[in-house]
Amino acid sequence: MFRYCCIFLAVHCVLGGNLIEVLQANGESKLIKYATACGLADTILGGTFTIFAPTNAAFDAIGTEQELLSDKTVLTTILLYHLTNGVIKSTDARNELAVESVAGLKVRFNIYPHNKAVTVEGAKISKFDLNASNGIVHVIDKVLVPPTGGIVDLVSGNKDLGTLLSLVQKANITGIIRRDPLTVFAPTNAAFSRLPANVLSRLNSDTALLKEVLEYHLVPHTAYSPGLYNREYIRTLDAQKDVIRLSVSGKTVSVNSYGRVIKADIPATNGVVHLIDHVLIPIRYWLSFGFGKFFKLTKMLKYFGLMFVVGSVWCGNLVEVLQADGESKLIKYVTAAGLAPAILAGTYTIFAPTDAAFDAIGTEAELLKDTTALGNILKYHVVKGTIPSSAAKNELQLETLAGTKIRFNIYSHNNAVTVEGSKITKFDLSASNGVVHVINKVMMPPTGDIVDLVVGNNDLSTLLTQVQNAGLANALKGDALTVFAPTNAAFASLGPSLLAKLASNKGLLTEILEYHVVPHTEYSEGLYNRETLRTIDRHHDRIRIHTRSDGSVVVNSSKVSKADISATNGVVHVIDHVLIPFRYRLQFGFGK
């Protein structure tokens, strides 16, 4: 359990020793020296405190003893920023928990299970729970420097961010940058000056575009350096919910591949800022901005994982294009269902399953047995008009001839673009009356939204009851949701006492159920090993994904038994155990 959540608590007890004695026993001699010099030793001994104790090396990293002792007023403020009233144990820590320091400013916890790190204001806690008679000590690897204000104040006070400040004001997103919590990858003045003049001009003349580009630099949670890892993908605040990709090598952090973090971990009262040397541009604007002149297109596509396989059959109609590409079964079924004349008479986009994809759902005899049902399935693969690959956006929905929408998802980390979870293997086969994109699975029209899906599945009846008891049915009718749905057997395995506890505590039940819901659409093609997904529960907890070599997927420690069940508002994956947030595992007896 501890290995899974990667907190690895190092528990030390100094029975009978006060906080100063505990610090001395653990070797924090410089903290004691500075606290004594500032007249804080008596304060520490006179109350009950939690101390986030920098090591001697941490103090050495910010200055010599002579430098630090030269202004005791400033030093006192810094030291008080490391103290909070009362006892805060490691078990009390939650991601984004902010606690009031004695200096009057809050300090923020962050838990990064993928990096086995727990931080406070970005300083990694290296030892937890050194118990004293009048409090507790957690040892940290950096000195915490009190922030001078929020992120807006930080940007306003940094001359090297003057261009960013003026553009933020122009786009009228100052309010967004006051959100809590927030991470900003902040381009310097030099970063903006690297943009071609036509791009800067376009940003200045198009406020909506400027807002979108600036929001692409904002992450809606606190990501300090100890929490960043190589090949991590972070979803941003822009309207398209784009992701940025991190490359971490030692202390060097790159964003997308062309932007480098030149100054990291600048704390603010509502999050953290990292300065970067290039402006980040969503991929869909690269060609229109003329970036093809500066980057090889093949490298760009490989980096973002779109890998377009473009084939053109000039002057051929849609049926001829399908025939030329080998989709013979699709043509056969379209003809049998009487849809060929309609397809030839209009302009359409066809998402074309391969012959193997059709074979996977039934024999020709089985599929042709009910041509009405087959026709509805086939219409679900056809959209009016021409939708090229360049028009694809994550979570974009298109109306099909079946009257039901299909959803695009772009999973750059897995080099995948999907439509209703089917991976597009060939893009942009042009025809005289439309375009074809080849997909690896037949898409089955959903019968309703996620609530309807749960209602119609007898093996999810306990989940349905719990959702109704918690009053969450409306929440599950939101759009772009992923639900990891425990079966009846999964709930039964919790045991009667825990089930009774959930039944008697609506708040707890709601929290547990919300821990199974992700606020975006994650089909199997988009899941990757060691990925963490933020859920909608009030603590913004994360679940961790493991993808195995045999194709199976494990969520925390629960196996996905049936994946990719499409609904009109997202996707459901059936799982064999109920997911429990880490903070409840010992309380629920799972440590056994």
Image (tube, helix red, strand yellow):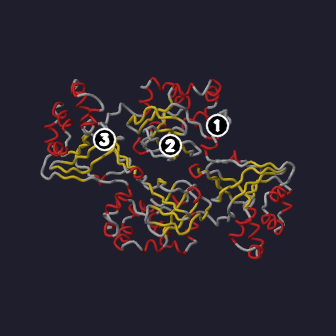
Q: Does 115 appear above or below 505?
A: below
Circles 1 and 3: CB distance less than 8 Å?
A: no
Q: Mark 1 or 3, which is nearer the eye?
A: 3
In-front residue for pair 99/588: 588
Q: Residue furthest front?
A: 549
Q: Amino acid at mark 1?
A: Arg
Circles 1 and 2: CB distance less than 8 Å?
A: no
Q: Circle 2 is placed at which residue position?
A: 545
First in sequence: mark 1 vs mark 3: 3
Please identify the quarter of the rendering in which residue 329 is found.
Answer: top left
Q: Does 485 appear above or below 432?
A: above
What residue is drawn where x is 22% and y is 25%?
365
SS at mark 2 in the image: strand
Please identify the quarter of the rendering in which residue 26 is found.
Answer: bottom right
First in sequence: mark 2 vs mark 3: 3
Q: Amino acid at mark 2?
A: Ile
| Image x and y of residue 270, in percent | 60, 58
Question: Residue 585 got which mark?
Answer: 1
- Looking at the rendered image, the quarter that the C terminus falls into is top right
Circles 2 and 3: CB distance less than 8 Å?
A: no
What residue is drawn where x is 13% and y is 37%?
341
Q: Circle 3 is placed at which residue position?
A: 440
Q: Amino acid at mark 3?
A: Asn
What residue is drawn where x is 54% and y is 38%?
514
Looking at the image, residue 95 sits to the left or right of residue 483; the answer is: right
Cα distance, mark 1 to mark 3? 40 Å
First in sequence: mark 1 vs mark 2: 2
